[in-house]
């Protein structure tokens, strides 16, 4: 791995891990009704496209960091549906 690839991984980890505080807050509060489903669908679409791009370019930093981000986004959506209040769960 060269310096630029390492830099790409560090940059990707910084941006991808920005969702971790929201995940922690959601888990602690067990509330996610204010989280936008559409935003996460858009983010996941972008992540999927970046992963595809990374595969086509054989660029591991892009693939790894966007796959990590995709997993965090999926986790957030799962928490949203788990912790969003519905009339049946009140």
Image (cartoon, rainbow, N blue to C red):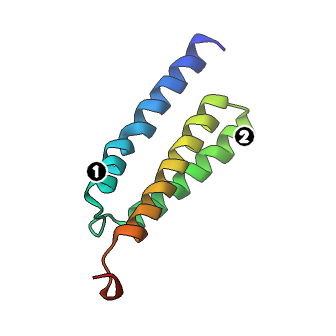
* Most foreground residue, 65 or 3: 65
Please determine whether, in this image, residue 5 is positioned above or below residue 35: above
Residue for point 45% across, 62% down? 77
- Compare marks 1 and 2 and give the one earlier in the sequence: 1
Q: Which mark is residue 25?
A: 1
Residue for point 66% across, 38% down? 54
Residue for point 33% across, 47% down? 24
Q: Which mark is residue 72?
A: none
- Which label sits in the foreground, 1 or 2? 1
The residue pinned by badge 2 equals 55
* Most foreground residue, 86 or 55: 86
Q: In screen coordinates, is 14 left or right of 90?
A: right
Q: In screen coordinates, is 13 left or right of 22?
A: right
Q: In screen coordinates, is 69 left or right of 34?
A: right
Disc 1: CA contacts within 10 A as few (<14), some (14-19) or many (>=20): few
Q: In screen coordinates, is 19 left or right of 31?
A: right
């Amino acid at each position: 791995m060269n310096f630029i690839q390492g830099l790409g991984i560090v940059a990707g980890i910084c941006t991808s891990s920005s969702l971790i505080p929201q995940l922690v807050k959601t888990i602690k509060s067990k509330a996610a009704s204010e989280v936008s489903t559409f935003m996460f669908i858009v983010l996941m679409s972008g992540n999927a496209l970046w992963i595809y791009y990374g595969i086509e370019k054989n660029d591991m930093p892009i693939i790894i960091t966007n796959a990590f981000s995709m997993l965090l986004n999926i986790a957030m959506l799962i928490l949203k549906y788990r912790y969003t209040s519905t009339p049946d769960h009140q």
